[in-house]
Image (cartoon, helix red, strand yellow):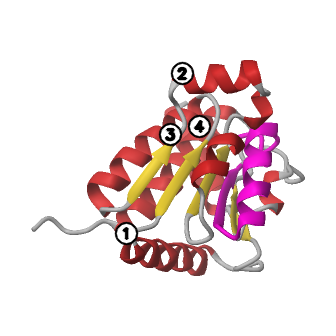
Amino acid sequence: MWNKHTQKLQNCLSSIEVDGAKCAASNCDQAFSLWKNLTEELREQGKIIYLIGNGASASMASHFSADLAKNAHVHTQVFTDLALITALANDISYDQVFVEPLKRRLTPNDMLVAISSSGNSPNVLNACRFAAETGATVVTLSAMSAENTLRTLGDINFWLPAETYGMAETGHACILHYWMDSVSVPPA
């Protein structure tokens, strides 16, 4: 069973598709190289990487925000504060919980990394649209349906043909770790 499961994960990761405004139908190596270069430029300019997601994707956003700050020496931010999320959801709308804080912080030189297994979460989609309108770099990670909306909104869109949330989340963690490892600064 374990070997069959890990083989399915390998097949899923080997079948990743990447496209977007800055990398039309490119291969993974080209997309990761572009993402690395954009991240390094952002670090040199002292700009911010915002990471968003719901559920397990929110946990990944928080985890990688901390790891990027620690290992890649970039300024990162997530919107996982329970008081902020519930206030925005109650007073404005849950589909605006990421857009509202981004309105006050996001600049054209920043980056938004959006993680969504389904690729159809309204709050994530709205944030990506807002970030694109602002001129920020948008990187998306999605899975499940090949027709999900998120994979059409970024400058770089990573899509996994995962059939389950577990496979999608594991694959997204692999993508995020690979990116982080590529931009990490060696210890002094």
**Label 4, label 2: how far apart the Cα atoms are:** 15 Å
* Residue position marked by numbered label 4 in the rendering: 57
Mark nearer the viewer, 4 or 2: 2
Identify which amino acid the numbered label 3 is placed on.
Met
Identify which amino acid the numbered label 1 is placed on.
Val
Residue 151, placed above or below residue 81: below
**Rendering coords of residue 153 (x, y %):** 79, 61
- Sooner in the amino-acid sequence: mark 2 or mark 1: 2
The local crowd at label 4, few if under 14, some if 14 to 19, many if 20 or more residues have their Cα within 10 Å, is many
The residue depicted at 67 percent of the width and 50 percent of the height is 103
**Viewer-proximal residue among 177 and 45:** 45
- Find the magenta span and give its range: 117-142
* Residue position marked by numbered label 2 in the rendering: 82
* Residue position marked by numbered label 3 in the rendering: 60
- Sooner in the amino-acid sequence: mark 4 or mark 2: 4
Determine the secondary structure under disc 3: helix
* Residue position marked by numbered label 1 in the rendering: 183
Q: Quadrant of the N terminus?
A: top right
The residue depicted at 54 percent of the width and 42 percent of the height is 170
- Sooner in the amino-acid sequence: mark 1 or mark 3: 3
Residue projecting furthest to the front: 104
Give the number of marks. Answer: 4
